[in-house]
Image (spheres, rainbow, N blue to C red):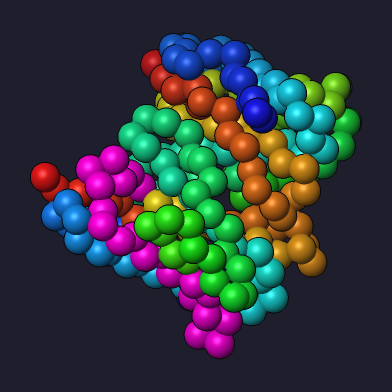
Amino acid sequence: DVKVTQSSRYLVKRTGEKVFLECVQDMDHENMFWYRQDPGLGLRLIYFSYDVKMKEKGDIPEGYSVSREKKERFSLILESASTNQTSMYLCASAKWAYNEQFFGPGTRLTVL
Amino acid sequence: RKEVEQDPGPFNVPEGATVAFNCTYSNSASQSFFWYRQDCRKEPKLLMSVYSSGNEDGRFTAQLNRASQYISLLIRDSKLSDSATYLCVVSSNRDDKIIFGKGTRLHILP
């Protein structure tokens, strides 16, 4: 069974804090993704990575950065959290970029 | 035209009824199509892939219409447990792009 785990289910941070969201997958997938999901806006791609140390911007990369030092781990970084980054963050992995994605349980981030 | 478009619903359907919803896509080069299911406060999970010849899995049937650029999902004999949001997903091998629709909410009523 594919398993994608995320470091926290719920997180509360203050404006201006640096926030790290961690994602780990155990299926040796090359591709990993970070999305945010907001009511009425659906899933929006922030960044994705198709290999270690490789990253590509998604549709809404502003205010975020990512790190992929190991194949199984993909981190999302909010350099200076803002209230408009309050959202559900979902990590996913896939063997091929255009194929089935397996999602983690999500992190609900609240920025005060 | 939006890349992937779905009726947001909600569709309120009595238990046991048949319900169908469509998803339209704009990129004619799209090659892979999926339906995902997302329960409230949970992550999306793959429900089924959609093949050119159609795909049936128990009470669920997915169809692809390339000429009109839409995919459909039909649920027969609906159960209370079918209540969820159904996400349409379209991808292109050519540019490794995968697009999620915003989802259609389905409520099965007892």
Q: Would you say B2 lies left or right of A97 here?
A: left
Whether residue A26 is visible: yes
State the residue at coordinates (39%, 16%): A112
The vertical placement of A104 against B55, above or below, is above
The vertical placement of B49 against B36, above or below, is below
A19 magenta-colored: no
Point out the image quarter for the N terminus of chain A: top right
Could you tell me residue B63's position as x and y percent? Answer: 49, 72
Q: Which residues are magenta?
A: B63-85
Q: Would you say B31 lies left or right of A106 here?
A: right
The image quarter containing residue A52 is top right
State the residue at coordinates (44%, 23%): A108
Could you tell me residue A67's position as x and y percent? Answer: 78, 25
The vertical placement of B62 against A26, above or below, is below
Q: Nearer the viewer, residue A25 or A108?
A: A25
Whether residue A48 is visible: no
